[in-house]
Image (cartoon, grey):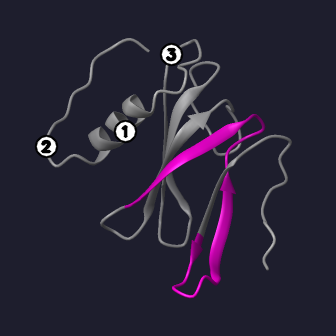
Amino acid sequence: MSTVTGRARRYYDFYVATLDKYGNLIWQKPYGGSNPDHGHSVLQTPDKGFVVAGYAESNDGDVTNNHGDSDYWIIKLDTLGNLKWQKSFGGSMSIGQNPFLLLMIIVSLFAESPFHMTGML
């Protein structure tokens, strides 16, 4: 049995852990800030790192450029869980939680050819 390590937060953070084929913990890390941040989707990237997508209400800690109450927040991790970059997408108000739009943002970041999205946030 392992315990969660990392920063103690008052609310929620993204939490990412990798396991070996036997279920043994390789590494675990929390990502986020002082307000609730909710991770929803993980995708392994061609470089064997990870992209984690969800929603962030924080504008401190790992989260920068939050535009309102709740933004889509996407982080890129290397194979060891080190934060390589992060991006916030949203407007001055809460964007709600639209999983389809979140998926489109992820696709646009990793598309082989130009990909454009339009709409109101």
Q: Which residue is mark 3?
A: 91
Give above or below for 57 relative to 29: above
- Residue at point 16% right, 49% down? 112
The answer to which of marks 1 and 2 sits earlier in the sequence is: 1
Please state which of the two labelled residues, at mark 3 or mark 1, is closer to the viewer: 1
Q: Which residue is mark 1?
A: 103
Q: Secondary structure at mark 2?
A: loop
Task: Give the labeled residue for mark 2.
Answer: 113
Cα distance in 3D space between marks 3 and 2: 26 Å
**Disc 2 residue type?**
Ser
Element assignment for label 1: helix
Q: Identify which residue, 36 or 68, lies in the foreground.
A: 36
Q: CA–CA distance between discs 3 and 1?
A: 18 Å
Can you give x and y, in whole percent of width and height, for residue 56 in the image?
62, 34
Q: Which three-letter amino acid code belongs to the residue tagged 3?
A: Gly
Q: In which image quadrant can residue 57 be found?
A: top right
Q: Nearer the viewer, mark 1 or mark 2?
A: 1
Residue 109 lies, in percent from the top left, at 31, 43
Residue 70 versus residue 84 in the image, above or below: above
Within 10 Å of disc 3 (Cα), the crowding (few <14, some 14-19, many 20+) is some
Front residue (pair 116, 84): 116
Circle 3 — which element? loop
Q: Which residues are magenta?
A: 18-44
